[in-house]
Image (cartoon, rainbow, N blue to C red):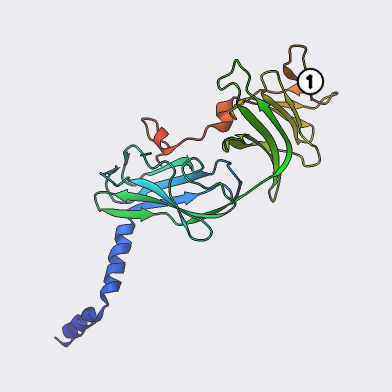
Amino acid sequence: MQRVALRYRAMKSTPLCATLVLFGSSALGQIQVDLRFPRLQYIAYEPVVATVGITNLAGRDVDLHDVPGQPWFGFEVTGQDGQIIGPLKTSATQPPLKIEAGKRVTQKINLTPLFQVHDFGTYHVRAHIYFVDLAKYFYSPAKVFEVTDARPIWQRTVGIPEETAGPGDMRTYSLLTNRFPDHTSLYVRVEDKDRGIVYATYSLGRIIAFDEPHAELDRANQLHVLFCAAPRAWAYDRVGLNGELLSHASFMETKTRPRLVHGNDGDVRVAGGMMEAPLSQESRNAVPKLSDRPKTMPKNE
């Protein structure tokens, strides 16, 4: 009887907050959210692609879906001074998602068109899931990335030809380089400076730092870029007026070194070297979104 009384007094003396913490940790284990970025540093307007993983630990299948006024999925982004950065597309929603018990679903999402993360500085990001059945949020650990600007090495402003949509407008092409700990990357940026619109910024690939890229414009004012990506290896890209990567190919330096030449018709082509198999635009630039899921769930592990 004395042991029972001692046990009762011990239970009675346990703080209520400790009981709530234990209960909360159990609930939080039902859905696990993780977030990661492939690297720490990005340049302004470059796609910042986050990989989000959702693991179902509830012991049953779960259905994640919106309720009125409450989307089931989102991000929390704060700047380096702690200010909250709201989403640019507040009306964007994700379709419902069903995850089988014990399964994990991953997807890649580009934050650049969703949040104002173009200014230089450090950003903290958390992904969150709202599970309607429990009326609870589940958060990923916070991750950090930094936005900086690259070194401009070449720039041209051109007009849009009459036969193209938007004739009379202007576009500025820029080539920039950014040094990472183990390599240097070449970037292209396409913008309308008068309107303050950046249509695209992305990496064309690694470049050998001591060799400047070659850039030429064809009769349609499309940009052609040829650069040395590795010893005796060259990369060739053609970029459109709205930032589209229209084509990509690789060349090997043989007895002759690849170079850009203008034809009599105003077109630009690569002369010299030996071309390897070209790559399509989709294989280099496509960034899937959570809403782009096929009918069969991706990476359901």
Residue at the limit of the structure toward the top, as seen here? 265
Q: Residue at the far left: name it.
A: 1
Left or right: residue 28 compared with residue 218: left
In this rendering, the count of numbered labels is 1
Instruction: Say which amino acid is labelled 1.
Output: Val
Image side of residue 296 versus residue 180, left or right: left
User: Measured along the vertical axis of the image, is residue 119 above or below residue 271?
Assistant: below
Q: Secondary structure at mark 1?
A: strand
Residue that carries the numbered disc 1 in the rendered image? 261
Q: Residue at x 31, y 68 (%)?
A: 21
Front residue of 175/132: it is 175
Q: Is 214 positioned to the left or the right of 47 in the image?
A: right
Graded by Cα atoms within 10 Å as few (under 14), some (14 to 19) or many (20 or more), the crowding at tag 1 reads some
Place of residue 159 in the rendered image (x, y in percent of width and height, measured from the top left): 65, 25
Q: Quadrant of the C terminus?
A: top left
The answer, for residue 249, to whether it is visible in the render is no
Report whether 215 appears left or right of 256. left
Image quarter of the N terminus: bottom left
Q: Which residue is pictured at 18% across the width and 81% down the height? A: 8
Q: Position of residue 68 (x, y in %)?
A: 25, 44
